[in-house]
Image: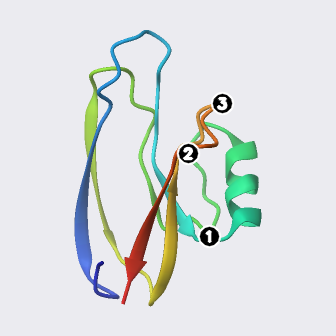
Amino acid sequence: VFPAYTNIKLNFNNKATALGMSHNAVIIPADEAIANEVRKAGMKPSTDERIVAQTEILEPGQNTSIVFETPGPGQYYVVCTYPGHSNMVAQITVE
């Protein structure tokens, strides 16, 4: 749980060891329709205004951090838009 309108830093590590197991993290409102649209857009960074924050694609062994201001109260998804990874979803609560 994160407070609303607060700068936070999230660290992401791709712990995969197999080639081709790339991942990213895209934070969006917790809405399946939005999630599906963002997944269809694929792996390139997006300027979609519904995206709260996003990482670049991480290859196995790579890591990155993103710093962003949390949006207003609600539920948000963290999705991977790499092809075939639609089941990779986490949820963030902002209060």
Q: Residue at x 50, y 71 (%)?
A: 76
The residue type indicated by label 2 comes to Pro
Compared to residue 48, the image places residue 8 above or below, namely below
Query: Which-is-in-front pick, marks 3 and 1?
Result: 3
Sequence-wise, the earlier of marks 2 and 3 is 2
Q: Give the amino acid at mark 1.
A: Arg
Query: 21 or 45: nearer the eye?
Result: 21
Q: Which residue is mark 3?
A: 83
Figure check: 10 above or below 92? above
Residue with the mark numbered 1? 50
Q: Could you tell me how far apart the alpha carbons at marks 2 and 3 are, in whole angstroms?
A: 14 Å
Q: Earlier in the sequence, mark 3 or mark 1?
A: 1
- Whichever of callouts 1 and 2 sits on the residue coming sooner in the sequence is 2
Vertical comparison of 60 with 8: above or below: above
Residue 3 drawn at (x, y percent): 28, 86
Within 10 Å of disc 3 (Cα), the crowding (few <14, some 14-19, many 20+) is: few
Please identify the quarter of the rendering in which residue 81 is found.
top right
Q: What is the number of the mark on residue 45? A: 2
Disc sitting over residue 78 in the figure: none
- Circle 3 SS class: loop
Type of amino acid at the residue the image marks with label 3: Pro
